[in-house]
Image (cartoon, grey):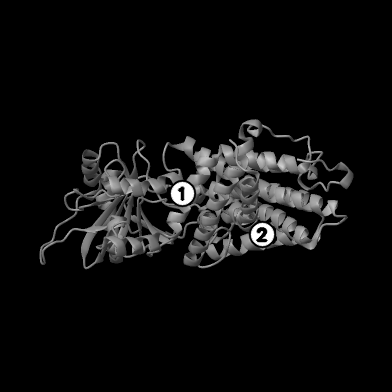
Amino acid sequence: MKIRADIVRMYREIHSWVGIVCGLFLFVAFYAGAITMFERPLQDWASPPVSLPPPVSLERFPELLEKTFAEHPEARNAYTVVLHPTPSQPASLVWGMPQRMHGPAAASYSALAEDGSLVTRRQPPSEAAHFINMLHQQVGLWMPHEVGRFFMGVVALLYSVALISGTLVVLPGLVKNLFAIRLGQNAKRMWLDLHSMLGLFSLPFHIIMALTSVVFAFHDEIYVAEHALLGGKAVHQVQGHPHADRASGLHQQQVPAGEFRAPLEPAQIVATITKQAPGFMPETLVYDNSHGGHLALRVTGHDPRYGARGAGGGFAGVDPYSGKLLSTDYLPGHQTLPMAVLTSFFVLHFGSFGGEGVRWGYAVLGLAGAFMFYAGNQLWIVSRRRRERGSGCVEDTRSTRLLCSLTVGCSLGCVAGVSTVLAAAPLLPAGGEMSHVQIIYFAVFLSCVAVCFCLKERQAIRTLLFVSAILTFLMPISASVATPLSQVTASSLIVDCTAILYGALLLLWAIRPQAGQPLFRKEQPSGLSKV
């Protein structure tokens, strides 16, 4: 494909400057986003063990509910029946959880001892994995969520511009340079090849991320515009916003005054849902009795044949007295066409379809995307250095040195910070509260940036890689200290093994014979060659 040279130059300039402005934010977003693909396993891994009797069978739920309500009447206001307990939700009955828009919250757990007596514990779950998710959503910035969401939307818009301009730049030489990665040539060519190849082969993934991020960031504004243009209620609100009851699936079943009706037992609810929605596997029954005394029920679960609204699966509003489905807006396989289209944005962004293979694929694409942004910044730095050496400058200018230090410090600072949070979480009280993990991450992050300003580039890259590798190796060690061997699960072992493999990769990168040379080599004027 032929494009005029002046047009290519214009788009190259646009791509370069947009990339420089948002590249470091996107590195953090993609790196943290790749780890967020395993938020639930990481939360289970980091949450401290709770000493409770084994979960009760489905048939014994009425006994558990009766004894819990007798000793703790306040539990009737809002409680959750967990059909498949996990380390982060270790009991069959969870109650006393405060309403929060974002993240896990402290809750009380109820179980039955062998003699039938009630055992309750209150335990806050680990917030380390949720913090990494928020880091992803707010592109690495510590600010209020709503402000961070808006800023993320602006970055996503710039990201879209960079995708379009970058694609137009590489189109003229697409066939010739598609598989060309010239590692043995000059640094600029190497970074250009890596950046272009990663961008082209993952272009559909990046388009999906850019489009869905813009929708998530500006969904309130989109709903307001929809309301103004179409009139009536905006039916696609999310939790925490106007008309949220519809989206959350907590539909109330009105009961005439003076009439008492006992809700169906959990086993009966599961049976009726299975009949009405074959293939849908319920996981939790969320009861809410705080709206005028009328009981509401939301059933969450997943159907492996369909994508879900999020990593937690889909959900439906259910009549707790008859088991009849009241709302299927977010029930996989039972949605209307408009709701299915809306859900597709969540499905594509979260990778909540296709099982574990898609999840791992999204994680790899996320890490590759982070490296692509790093390579783009390095390409700009090497090009800038070539121009400076050609004009007679022996040392880097202040702006080049600033960008280089920020590129290395922010990128490896994010890697080291995330590893530190995960390594520290099992040893922290309650697996790490949000305030604690925030302080830990940003202390490590800013320290890494400071190291890059104090040390030369090769020394900084090697030092931070060593530190990141050691911190990653500490993850399974801290988990083994906090969790008895008898309580280790298969999911925890997978997290530990992944940490060891990833730490080994970081260590190999740090100790390889040419460590730092292709990344930060300062080319001498005599060795310059035209690209």
Q: Where residue 431 appears, x then y in whole percent?
A: 53, 57
Give the residue drawn at x 32%, y 55%. 80
| Nearer the observer, 255 or 398 | 398
- Quadrant assignment for the C terminus: top right
Give the residue drawn at x 10%, y 66%. 258
Q: Where residue 358 appears, x then y in whole percent?
A: 47, 37
Q: Is residue 221 left or right of residue 148?
A: left
Q: Quadrant of residue 179?
A: top right
Whether residue 172 is visible to the viewer of this picture, yes or no, is yes
Residue underneath mark 1? 87
Q: Quadrant of residue 72?
A: bottom left
Q: Where residue 86 appears, x then y in whole percent?
A: 43, 47
Mark 2, secondary structure of its residue? helix
| Nearer the observer, 492 or 499 | 499
Q: CA distance from mark 1 to mark 2?
A: 29 Å
Which residue type does callout 2 highlight? Answer: Phe
Q: Earlier in the sequence, mark 1 or mark 2?
A: 1
- Quadrant assignment for the N terminus: top right
Kindly identify which numbered label has been placed on residue 445. Answer: 2
Q: Where residue 501 appears, x then y in whole percent?
A: 64, 39
Kindly identify which numbered label has been placed on residue 505. Answer: none
